[in-house]
Amino acid sequence: MFIKQQNTMPNESLDPVFQLIKSLTRSEKRHFRLFTNRQGSNEGLKFLQLFDALDEQARYDEERVLTEVPAIKKVQLANLKANLYKQMLASLRLYHLGQNLDIQLREQLDYARVLYNRGLYQQSLKMLEKVKVAAHHAEMPHIALLALDFEKLIESQYITRSLRGKAENLSAEVRDTVAHLTQEHELSNLSLRMYGLYLKIGHARNQEDSESITKLFREAVAGVDLTAGAFLRSCTIIRRRCGTTPSPRTFAPATATRRSGSICLPSIRASRSSSSCST
């Protein structure tokens, strides 16, 4: 009996459906029940019965679920749990839609595809234009690029007959967005490298460590446009991952060398002038 308990312990902590249920707030659980009841099917009822049975448990117990919900057979449990997990994610996506702009924009992209499939090409293009504007404004070039790719697909098929005079503008917009996205990836890669270095060596222990880190940082940003907002945001990411959360004033122009924990992150000026880091 003792051996059986030892074998079931990992399932209690690793079952993804059970973990997700236990992470839900009261309002999220209420929303899920309403979301499930809208289906009005026997399958939906089983979802809810399984959800309620798992929600009442302090530890995951499969045998108890089967006992408390006779309508669920053991051979059905795996598929029901997989579908329940999918339904909970769909419910959470809908519940938090207003708090996540990227989810909203991707939903608009899906709607643009639906309109395209219905042959409503002008409506699809209008929706893509709205997505592009919102994505650029929110500094989400990866979503803007998805909209641009879809727009190119529609225009290149000569469906709307509106490509004349627009091709160059569309191509230039794609190039600018790709350049922006490439720079963001380069800087996020630097952020990961700096964080990995921090995990490897910890705080700078002496002047030699500080100079080595400063050299790495300067070489990585040598070709970066220092006036671009993405550069400043990526510096914030680097500092946060190294242990501090700077205020916006941290990145005022012509300031002294930055410091994160004991790792000195230099203030890169247009002149590439160096400065000291006080301890």
Image (tube, rainbow, N blue to C red):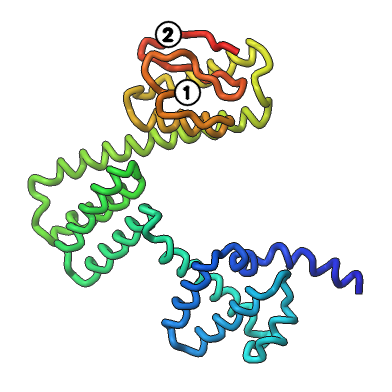
Find numbered disc 1 in the image and state the secondary structure of the residue it sits on. Answer: helix
- Residue depicted at 41% across the width and 11% down the height: 272
- Residue depicted at 34% across the width and 24% down the height: 225
Going by the picture, which residue comes out furthest to the right? 2
- Residue depicted at 41% across the width and 66% down the height: 94
Residue identifier under label 1: 220
Amino acid type indicated by mark 1: Ala
- Residue depicted at 46% across the width and 69% down the height: 91
Find numbered disc 2 in the image and state the secondary structure of the residue it sits on. Answer: loop
Image location (x, y in percent) of residue 186: 44, 33
Image location (x, y in percent) of residue 146: 32, 51
Image location (x, y in percent) of residue 2: 91, 70
Q: Quadrant of the N terminus?
A: bottom right
Crowd band around label 1 with a 10 angstrom C-alpha radius: few (<14), some (14–19), many (20+): some
Amino acid type indicated by mark 2: Ser
| Labels 2, 1: front one | 2
Q: Residue 245, can we see it?
A: yes
Residue 53 figure quarter: bottom right
Mark 2 and mark 1 residues within 8 Å of each other at the beta carbon = no
Nearer the observer, 34 or 67: 34
Image location (x, y in percent) of residue 9: 79, 65
Q: Marks 2 and 1, how far apart in space?
A: 16 Å
Q: Residue 141, can we see it?
A: no
Residue identifier under label 2: 273
| Residue 148 shown left or right of residue 31 in the figure | left
| Residue 166 shown left or right of residue 191 in the figure | left
Q: Quadrant of the C terminus?
A: top right
